[in-house]
Image (cartoon, rainbow, N blue to C red):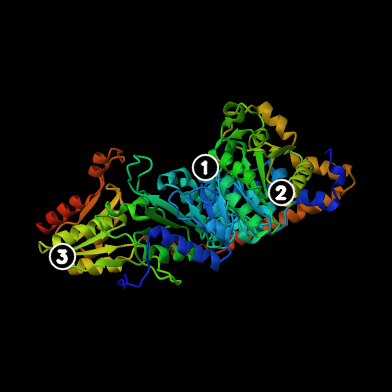
């Protein structure tokens, strides 16, 4: 990420997504938004305010409010994409994706293949993830379900710079792209949850894209490679800073895209450090961390000094009571303990 | 004789007849070829339901689109997928309309305005709204037709799709092929509402019903429905009462239906019916009908020969087109 000069503009992920979407809508008349509560006058601009101001610029014909019908949202986005438009569909919470699994998994992911390559489905589906004291049905991180589906690309944005660059790349991509965003990272409210880290960053006002399928090294280090997304990325960064005083030097990678995964960046790091940890808020069993661990075992095992470690949400529904939620979700303390443990192996 | 048939021209009547005959003979030959081991997989066939596909699609332009179901052979042929590419697809050949990747349940071809058929019951009922939305946003004047069975009207997708199409006033015709059975389950066991069309009013959607065993009646009803959708006055649901003369899929012995019921519906076979209508209405002669039969047989033999001689896909094709 670019270093921040005093004159540089710092904005939040929500603002960066809004700016990226607006730029794409100005650039390409085939781009439109579709979802629940996204353009209603006097409403809230989508569940997390990302679309505020857009109806005034683009009109409600291109910001299409729907009934509470997730199957219709996904189906309509797919159908329009097959006709050559570039819809950005909105799930208020990623938990609601399970309402449209048929449209996403059976239809969107497979339409190109079933047509023998004659069709393409350039649709984006935005979906907020993450536990925020809302309990079991508004706090899941369901990325891994979709990593298992050939035909879908899976993006996780964790900072404003990459959020803008990736949402623009997702709109321009000719495949269904699921963009998972963490609720606590949209604005400044999540700062404390993210280990006190600044959640804004420099975002150029001009147009740029960031490629899908490219990871970034967020912190250079020599002893241990940590792959983490969303709020876990910030907790890992905070843990790494705290442990640096003890002489533990972590290298931290934000994969940004889970499918297709930038294995080259990860393997280069693992071959350097000899240790690999994956941290995610998705549950442990069958989570995407398991896939990275398996791939690392196939490709880097002779570079490893010890076992690969996964730190993930416990295999339980997300509980609501803050004390229980903190216990289930990877905390900075849990990540730090896991790092110490791994360095001692 | 059909009530509105007086408005039908010779060209339309003979066209409907040829289309139905092509579908019927295609299905009959496919069944034999399947039993002989030439065609892999399974089959969901539409003998008996030809009037719906033919009558609806005869009113559509090539630029209009349809979605179909797990029983798509008739829809594909009626929308203009060539017999060669449909047959080759069933053979799993690379010359098939989906290059061998779709198969029987996913026949389709964007070149003629047909998505790969959607074999999840009700699956097309939401996807079609995106077609209609695109046509409306771009003001293209195109229409989308969603074929679905009566069984799909018990899926959530039916209700979400219909309501969304209604509130957005999309240019869509939802065509229900009510063949009375979802696999082995009769509709009266799973719906207290006998007509799928009755469900449309719950969403403020106009609906009509047609005798799905009468191609001229379907043609007339579909023309009205498609004109309405194209005019921008929102979606419409057209329910066609029909019957499949064969089982749900290959290997279905149809023990859930009585022989008397089957005989009753076989007597309504839409193909002899339109042949009688054509002659009776002076739109064509026995000789015209014989000529159509010969041309269908020629086309069918050509399609089979083409399919047999076509190359198989390369094994490496399996990983092509997963992503664009």
Decide: is A326 above or below A121.
above
Residue designated by label 3 = A249
Residue at 62%, 53% in the rendered image: B133
Horizontal side of A286 relative to A54 (left or right) equals: left
Residue A58, position in %: x, y? Answer: 57, 60
Residue designated by label 1 = A68
Residue B100, position in %: x, y? Answer: 53, 58
Q: Secondary structure at mark 2?
A: helix
In this rendering, the count of numbered labels is 3
Quote the CA–CA distance across marks 1 and 3. Answer: 48 Å
Chain hosting mark 3 = A
Residue designated by label 2 = B229
Residue at 64%, 26% in the rendered image: B258
Quadrant of the image for the C terminus of chain A?
bottom left
Chain hosting mark 1 = A
Query: What residue occupies the far right of the structure in this picture?
Result: B282
Residue B294 appears in view = yes
Residue at 50%, 53% in the rendered image: A89
Horizontal side of A250 relative to A180 (left or right) equals: left
Residue A288, position in %: x, y? Answer: 31, 54
Label 1 and label 2 in one chain? no
Residue B239 appears in view = no
> Alpha-carbon neighbours of circle 2 within 10 Å: few (<14), some, or many (≥20)?
many
> Alpha-carbon neighbours of circle 1 within 10 Å: few (<14), some, or many (≥20)?
few
Chain hosting mark 2 = B
Horizontal side of A338 relative to A129 (left or right) equals: left
């Amino acid at each position: 990420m670019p270093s921040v000069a005093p004159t540089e503009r710092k904005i939040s992920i929500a603002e960066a997504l809004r700016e990226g979407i607006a730029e794409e809508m100005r650039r390409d008349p085939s781009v439109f938004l579709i979802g629940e509560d996204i353009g209603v006058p006097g409403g809230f601009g989508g569940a997390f305010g990302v679309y505020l101001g857009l109806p005034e610029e683009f009109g409600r014909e291109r910001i299409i409010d729907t009934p509470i019908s997730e199957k219709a949202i996904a189906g309509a986005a797919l159908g329009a994409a097959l006709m050559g438009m570039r819809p950005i569909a909105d799930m208020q919470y990623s938990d609601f994706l399970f309402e449209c699994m048929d449209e996403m998994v059976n239809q969107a992911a497979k339409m190109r293949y079933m047509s023998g390559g004659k069709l393409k489905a350039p649709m984006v589906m935005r979906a907020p993830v993450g536990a925020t004291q809302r309990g079991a049905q508004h706090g899941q991180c369901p990325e891994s379900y979709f990593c298992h589906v050939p035909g879908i690309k899976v993006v996780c944005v964790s900072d404003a710079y990459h959020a803008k660059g990736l949402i623009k790349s997702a709109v321009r991509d000719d495949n269904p792209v699921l963009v998972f965003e963490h609720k606590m990272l949209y604005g400044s409210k999540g700062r404390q949850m993210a280990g006190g880290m600044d959640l804004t960053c420099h975002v150029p006002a001009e147009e740029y894209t960031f490629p899908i399928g490219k990871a970034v090294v967020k912190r250079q280090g020599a002893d241990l490679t940590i792959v983490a997304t969303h709020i876990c990325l910030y907790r890992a960064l905070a843990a790494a800073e705290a442990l640096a005083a003890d002489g533990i030097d972590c290298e931290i990678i934000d994969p940004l895209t889970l499918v297709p995964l930038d294995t080259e960046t990860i393997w280069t790091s693992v071959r350097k450090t000899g240790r690999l940890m994956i941290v995610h808020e998705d549950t442990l069993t069958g989570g995407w961390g398991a896939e990275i661990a398996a791939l690392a075992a196939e490709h880097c095992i002779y570079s490893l000094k010890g076992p690969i470690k996964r730190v993930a949400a416990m295999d339980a529904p997300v509980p609501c009571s803050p004390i229980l939620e903190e216990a289930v979700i990877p905390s900075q303390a849990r990540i730090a303990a896991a790092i110490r443990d791994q360095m001692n192996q | 004789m059909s009530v509105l048939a007086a408005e039908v021209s010779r060209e339309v009547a003979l066209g409907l007849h040829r289309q139905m005959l092509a579908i019927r003979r295609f299905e009959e030959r496919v069944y034999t070829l399947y039993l002989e081991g030439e065609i892999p997989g399974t089959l969901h066939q539409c003998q008996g339901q030809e009037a719906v596909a033919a009558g609806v699609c005869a009113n559509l332009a090539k630029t209009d689109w349809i979605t179909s179901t797990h029983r798509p052979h008739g829809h594909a042929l009626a929308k203009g997928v060539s017999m060669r590419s449909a047959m080759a697809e069933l053979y799993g050949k690379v010359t098939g309309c989906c290059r061998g990747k779709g198969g029987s349940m996913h026949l389709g071809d964007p070149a003629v305005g047909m998505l790969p058929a959607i074999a999840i019951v009700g699956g097309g009922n939401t996807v079609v709204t995106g077609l209609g939305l695109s046509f409306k946003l771009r003001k293209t004047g195109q229409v989308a037709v969603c074929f679905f069975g009566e069984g799909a009207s018990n899926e959530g997708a039916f209700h979400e799709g219909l309501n969304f199409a209604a509130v957005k006033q999309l240019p869509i015709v939802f065509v229900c092929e009510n063949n009375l059975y979802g696999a082995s389950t009769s509709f009266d066991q799973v719906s207290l509402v006998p007509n799928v069309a009755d469900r449309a009013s719950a969403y403020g959607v106009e609906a009509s019903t047609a005798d799905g065993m009468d191609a001229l009646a379907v043609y007339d009803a579909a023309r009205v429905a498609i004109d309405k959708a194209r005019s921008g006055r929102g979606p419409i649901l057209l329910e066609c009462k029909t019957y499949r003369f064969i089982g749900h899929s290959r290997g279905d012995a149809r023990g859930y239906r009585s022989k008397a019921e089957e005989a009753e519906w076989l007597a309504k076979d839409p193909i002899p019916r339109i042949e009688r209508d054509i002659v009776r209405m002076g739109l064509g002669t026995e000789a015209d009908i014989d000529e159509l039969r010969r041309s269908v047989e020629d086309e069918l033999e050509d399609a089979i020969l083409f399919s047999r001689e076509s190359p198989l896909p390369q094994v490496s094709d399996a990983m092509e087109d997963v992503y664009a």
